[in-house]
Image: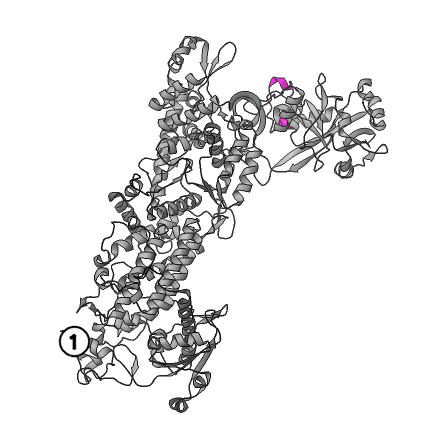
Amino acid sequence: MSFLLSKNHHRGSAASLHKGKTRTARRVYFSVDANTPKKNGGTTTNNKKNTNSGKKKESNAYAATVLLPQTTFEMRANSVQKEPLMQKWWLENNVYKQVANRDESKENQESFTLHDGPPYANGDLHIGHALNKILKDFITRYQALRGKRVRYVPGWDTHGLPIELKVLQSIEDPEVRKNLTPIKLRKKAAKFALGQVERQSKQFQRYGIWGEFENPYMTLQPAYEASQLEVFGKMFLNGHIYRGKKPVHWSPSSQTALAEAELEYPDVHVSQSVYVAFPIEATLEGANAIKDETLKSTLLDGSLKLAVWTTTPWTMPANAAVAMNPKLEYRVCDFKGEKIVVANDLVASLSETLEDTLTALGESPFLGAEMEGLTYQHPTIKDRVNPVIVGGDYITTDAGTGLVHTAPGHGQDDYIAGLKYNLPLHSPVDDLGNFTEEAGSELFGLNVLGDGNEKCIEQLQAANALLKREPYEHKYPYDWRTKKPTIFRATEQWFCSVEGFRDDALKALDSVKFIPESGSKRMRPMVSGRSDWCISRQRSWGVPIPCFFFEETNEVLMDESIIKHVTDIVRKEGTDAWFMKDIEELLPSEHKSKASSLRRGTDTMDVWFDSGSSWNGVLNERGMNAPCDLYLEGSDQHRGWFQSSLLTSVAATGRAPYKTLLTHGFVLDENGYKMSKSKGNVVDPNFVIEGGKNQKTEPGYGADTLRLWVASTDYNSDVSIGSNVIKQTSENYRKIRGTLRFLMGVENDFKSKEHAIAFDQLPGFDQYCLYRLEETMKKIEIAYDNYNFAAVNSEINAFTTFLSNVYLDVSKDRLYLGHPSDAKRRAAQTVVHELITNLLAALAPILPHTAEEAFLARDTVAKEDKQISVFLQGWPTKKKNSNNNSIMSQADAKNWEALIDLRSVANLAIEDARNSKLVGASLETSIKVFAEDETFSRFLKTNEHFLKEMFICSEVTLCATLSDYEKKEDREEESKEVFSKSGDSDACAGKLFAAASKASGEKCLRCWCYSNALGTTDAKKHPKLCERCGPIVLDVAPDLVYHQEASNAEAVGASSS
């Protein structure tokens, strides 16, 4: 009786009560035999062993009349093998191209553009790449389903230091490396970058990402480089590009300037901090301007010193001033017999830090403004006298002494103060971070981050200027590529003057939607506080800045004609031309005569300028939406690509390049720790998809399982992944696949045009299922529109749980046991048809391989007027009845929800009956029910004919009053075994009651329902069939005859049936 195993009449476990509702806790899983042969309009045979039992089940000839599910959609996903074949099928059938090439001239044809932020072309992809690209793919596939023209152009950042270093590291001979010309290095770098792009492209596509991978954008492409130079030219002509000498982040390990976005700040960095005393020069002129008597007297006797604190002792040779806050209060203190000036609020803490008491002198403190104009002697450079100046709000009493050592060549705040006071720009440090001759013979050649720093401290101690040294733990900028400390150093560089368009950039952000909204609070301060952007780099592998220098004067020659001429050359030949052509060829006609007196610039542009110009190099260059609909990257890009794109776009065009900014967090291991190879907690997305060498112990889960994990995360924050997380995700995937498989199996003999029943003609329970479907699809649509994929996943899981636990569980009886053409069965199939269509659309963006496989596996009768792909089929239309009204009112839906809750109460009673051994299956029970709510009670009376099917039992008694419910029937008196339960429902008032007892009658051999009318249809042929099954069997298997004496309940003529 294998058909009864599939039908699964039994209640697997008791229902449970939550939040005031009774809900069934069991999830139903369906087994399907795809190879079962059909006869007589869809009847099937299935006499397989029940592998879950040690005993061989008896065969039952009536199994041949049961309509078991049939589908070629397999339960085993076999994703490792199938997914690449599906991806090949998409390419061969041009599915993406059909979406990307939708005719925009058509009326109401919308388009959607998600612009891809370019990953760096270096190394294999990690799980963060997978999270980012899969999220993007959810969006583009959903927009395609909505009928929009969608183009997704993947991109790569292919210039910059990491690739240049890879090339240099690959050359083992140091002499060859030393003599490598820029053009040879660039050729090698381009080859390396293209190889990395090809490698990463294959990995991205294995994730199921679709897009123009055959024609991606790369920052090394001539057309892209030319468009980048166009952006540079517009910014230059708008007055936003200039050359100057100022302090920038400099990486000695990379020997180049860095932008803020190229820095990282490790959690722990320890600097050697020093407290230093600078002796103030005693001048009568300076003393006369001072009102505070204590300050004046100590100044005149020549014993006064300024106490400063710094974490960079190596910058002492560049000291040009001491800055104070004019609004802070200061005090002259006695410290070991010396008179030093410190902030009044820091006297106590400095006594503790310096390990000796600072005794405040004088009756009261004085304002810092009194010290402006005083001068002091540099402690280690005897011919240098520096001023005391007014600093900014950066001078506080949070740390230090309240007086700030100022070196304009080594700090941004110092530089600004230096401009105000016309201070010298000392910066005696070379590209390698070593002191130059300007620092003095003792320091010359020493590295400022090593021996040079230590030597500076020794010099201060020798000059009796060192009050104390101590290690200081703080955040310090490191080169994100070499992972080594950087320094601030004044050099000649090209800058983008953010000051000139800062207000416009902030205004442009007003029109941008941030998801989450906190992104605005993060990015706006970054832009408002942004200093000028150093856009030049001292490297060969990049887009050159198209400028020339006069040999004699070192003056710059660059104008509109030069930029345009070079841009035209680059568009045809690429930026290699800048390094290969003669200077005269690079100059426009009006400047060619100057060629002999010029040298070309060797600086290249910051890679953030490269990627930040992509709105022009991709969106404008390829005729896509500009500004585009969406940028989606990690939250760190608020200071990276989002910002560089904003700055270049506003500076060149006056507007933001995007309408919406969406960010995701970082990926952590399943314990919430950052991934690292040293910890051994790195999750490789390729390993998740393909598995390891031993597929039994290290199975490959496929891309769709990885994608389902992404959909399950709250990606706006940091997310976690690990083996346990993936296993759980795999189980969720199997449940979704199993539900799809069952639905497709029971649709197998359904032709929509022939068999579909109008929605308003469907039984109430079927209408309710469509109502639930419609409500679910509304929520899913809203969730997709708001990029809330976790909500999509949650809604799908909740709805498939409802299907498995309720609708399909209840409907299996008519789907399996009804007449093939019975109206009630066709009604259920009509609903199933809609369920599949809608579920495939909802699942397709997240599980594209699975949804497409299921779409293609649907029987041809179910695919009438269909497109070739689920992604071309479009988003399902809203469900309406023949009067164009909603399928069901909320009031009617409430009644059905209350009935589902009553069903859960009945299941509890049935479970008690099973546990007591009164019954073995729910079909052996008789159910008695009562509802206190009058409206719901009337609903039950109207649908009394359906209750037996709803409860999957053999008898139902509907009681009009509680006393009727509590009254015992005669047979109850005899058995004395009645199991009663009650519960509540949010959908109706009052209590719900259900009681289970043993059903009367005998068991039908076909449906297993208990009946007092077995054999009434044809007592001779089918004495063991109930009044429902008898007519069905006579019609679908007229030759079948039951033979009571046949072994194992065989029936005569079974083979012919």
Q: Is residue 874 something one can see in this rendering?
A: yes
Q: Amino acid at mark 1?
A: Ala
Q: Does the segment drawn in magenta span residue 427?
A: yes
Secondary element under disc 1, as helix, strand or loop, is loop
Where is residue 644 shown, x and y percent of the image?
Answer: 48, 33
Identify the residue shown where x is 76% and y is 22%.
374
Q: Is residue 264 above or below residue 652?
A: below
Q: Which residue is mark 1?
A: 1054
For the N terminus, the quadrant is bottom left
User: In which quarter of the view is residue 502 placed?
Assistant: top right
Q: Is residue 90 above or below residue 829?
A: above
Viewer-nearest residue: 999 or 823: 823
Where is residue 535 shown, x and y percent of the image?
Answer: 50, 26
Q: Residues within 10 Å of mark 1 (few under 14, many from 20)?
A: some
For the C terminus, the quadrant is bottom left
Where is residue 305 shown, x and y percent of the image?
Answer: 78, 26
Viewer-nearest residue: 676 or 845: 845
Q: Is residue 917 above or below residue 519?
A: below
Where is residue 517 shown, x and y percent of the image?
Answer: 52, 45
Q: Residue furthest front?
A: 883
Q: Is 910 placed left or right of 361 in the picture?
A: left
What is the image's colouring? Answer: one colour
Part of the protein shown in magenta: 426-453
Q: Is 879 placed left or right of 250 in the picture?
A: left
Identify the residue shown where x is 41% and y is 40%.
629
